[in-house]
Amino acid sequence: MTYKAALSFADGKTLFCTVQKNERLLDAALRSGITLPLDCREGVCATCQGRCESGLYTQDYVDDEALSAADLARHKVLSCQTRLLSDAAFYFDYDSTLCSKAEPGRHRARVTALERPSARTAILHVKLDGEAILDYLPGQYARLHIPGTEQSRAYSFANASGTGTLQFLVRLLSDGVMSDYLRERCEVGDLIEFEAPLGTFYLRHVERPLVMVAGGTGLSAFLGMLDELAEQGGCGHPVRLYHGVRDVADLCELARIEDYARRITDFTFVPVISQPGAAWAGRRGYIADHLDQAAVGERPFDLYVCGPPPMVESIKAWREAQAAQDARLYFEKFIESHA
């Protein structure tokens, strides 16, 4: 039996390796050309320490001067002593440049479909060219090179990994390089090159209720996370997804989100429209206006936020105003290109 380990670093890069049954994580990484810092290899010096973000594992020996009981409760590990019991993700608080295999993978894919759910949103579907699958953590992103140009743009994966097909939500600007390509030139079969995986925004250990807040196409990152939760039938805690858009027409993937409600135990979707028409009977305004203790349920909870900087800042301000510092906050700001 083998397991897959995702190793994420402070510079936002993630590397993957396979871990054999009873193999130590450090040995598996080294075997894959990922040179994690090490020294004693005996569970004493803590040079190889990281933190498990998701998955099951055991540790052979950890000296109490290397990791305290509090460290262990926060899922800190020594990679030289860690053996996996499932696929898992780990975080190391240093740049991947300390490892010899530091560059993100370069990949090629072919366009298989382009959807236009609204005038301001496109959904790009691609299939890996000559590769079986691409490993990434739901919530991470790829940097796509725009065909016919020298420019690239970053977009979150909108589906879970494990297949050869990828999906991206793209905000269509009135004058943007990617927007113009999708509107004017994109055809099925086009070759798109990209680097991935990138980013440190991904789902951690689910130990308490989840509140997901998406602004516009920031929904993309959460679709991948929810795909993964749906495969598991839920996470044992309530899951709340808030999606803020300008107009009702900008809501997308509604059938898919409705399916999550059937497959994820205690899942709730809350769309919020900032400029709705008279016919809209749902939430109006901005997401921070509708986040209160009753809305998010029991505390403490984990708060994941992805969207434009003003929205992210408004949610951070809400958290401060509500004295909800016990809510662990993970966020990803994206800045729309204007060229």
Image (tube, grey):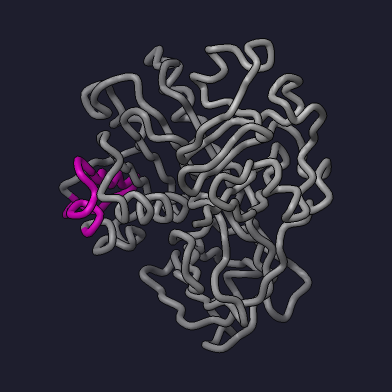
> Could you say where residue 27 lies in the image, as x and y percent from the top left?
70, 45
Position of residue 36 relative to residue 297, above or below, is below
> Could you say where residue 161 lies in the image, as x and y percent from the top left?
48, 61
Q: Count every numbered label the image shows and give the total.
A: 0
Q: Nearer the viewer, residue 158 or 118?
A: 158
Quadrant in the rendering for residue 82: top right
Position of residue 142 relative to residue 268, above or below, is below
Residue shown at 53% from the left, 12% from the top: 69
- Quarter of the image with the C terminus in it: bottom right
Quadrant in the rendering for residue 78: top right
Magenta segment range? 259-280
Q: Nearer the viewer, residue 256 or 307?
A: 256
Residue shown at 22% from the left, 43% from the top: 268
265 part of magenta stretch: yes
120 part of magenta stretch: no
Q: Nearer the viewer, residue 292 or 207?
A: 207
> Could you say where residue 239 lies in the image, as x and y percent from the top left?
28, 39
Residue shown at 80% from the left, 35% from the top: 37
The answer to whether residue 258 is left or right of residue 104 is left
Position of residue 296 relative to residue 26, above or below, is above
Position of residue 124 relative to residue 238, above or below, is below
Residue shown at 50% from the left, 65% from the top: 168
> Could you say where residue 228 lies in the image, as x and y percent from the top left?
38, 53
